[in-house]
Amino acid sequence: MENIKLVDTLRDKTNISYEEAKNALENNNWDILDAMLYLEEHGRVKKPSVSIFYTNEYKERYTNQKEVVNIREDREKNNSKSENNFGGIFESICKAIDTCNNIFVEIRRRGRVLLKLPLTVLILLLFFAFWIIIPLMTVGLFFDIEFLVLAKSVNTDKVNKVFSEISKNIQIIKEKLKKGFN
């Protein structure tokens, strides 16, 4: 009964006669994918425009036995799906880290570059030592230190404009403090 279903499926997919479909499947140990490739090689079915085929290593054997469902196999299939989701999350995290590694924060004073850090390093420093980094950045602004963000693939104009505005406002505050002390 299974074999008849396979022949019908192959006939539907390839538009060939029952005899040709059965013959192709018999020659390929009732493997429908191999039968399709066999028909393509013999010119009975048009090959796809792309010559790359993806397949997994696992080959199913079609037999006349009834299929027995195993609860453990179902659980393993569900676990493999969750692992695939984890793989997607892991790939996203790696992509974000790679993007941050290609964005640099440059620290300058009077046009001279003092330090150039990848954004990933700055994020880690802020995460583990924000109580040191934030005050240092704030105090640095009062000593004419500028912060710039540089990247090839990301537009950093808005961030640099914000840093520039902050520097201008700090300069105004410095001038007011100088006038207040005099």
Image (cartoon, rainbow, N blue to C red):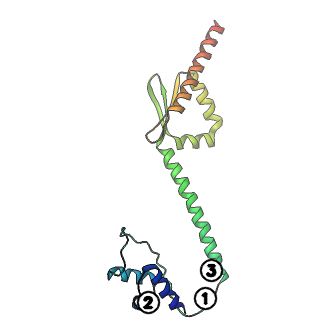
Look at the numbered disc 2 and give the secondary structure of its residue. Answer: helix
Indicate which disc, 3 or 1, sits on the residue closer to the N terminus.
Answer: 1
Q: Position of residue 10 (x, y in %)?
A: 46, 83
Q: Against 66, is 84 above or below?
A: above
Identified by mark 1, the residue type is Glu
Image quarter hosting the C terminus: top right
Q: CA distance from mark 1 to mark 2?
A: 26 Å
**Viewer-proximal residue among 9 and 168:** 9
Q: Position of residue 63 (x, y in %)?
A: 53, 92
Q: Is label 2 or label 3 in front? A: 2
Mark 1 lies on residue: 67
Horizontal side of residue 160 vs 112, given as left or right: right
For disc 2, the neighbor class at 10 Å (few under 14, some 14 to 19, many from 20) is some
Mark number, residue 18 = 2
Q: CA distance from mark 3 to mark 1?
A: 13 Å
**Viewer-proximal residue among 128 and 99:** 99
Mark number, residue 73 = 3
User: Is disc 3 in contact with disc 1, using a CB cutoff of under 8 Å?
Assistant: no
What residue is shown at x 39% (from left), y 89% (from top)?
A: 20
Residue 48 image-quadrant placement: bottom left
Q: Is label 1 or label 2 in front? A: 2
Q: CA distance from mark 2 to mark 3?
A: 35 Å
Look at the numbered disc 1 and give the secondary structure of its residue. Answer: loop
What residue is shown at x 48% (from left), y 37% (from top)?
A: 155
Q: Is label 3 or label 1 in front? A: 1
Look at the numbered disc 3 and give the secondary structure of its residue. Answer: helix
Image quarter hosting the N terminus: bottom right
**Viewer-proximal residue among 97 and 126:** 97
Q: Against 118, is 12 above or below?
A: below
Q: Position of residue 29 (x, y in %)?
A: 43, 90
Identified by mark 3, the residue type is Glu
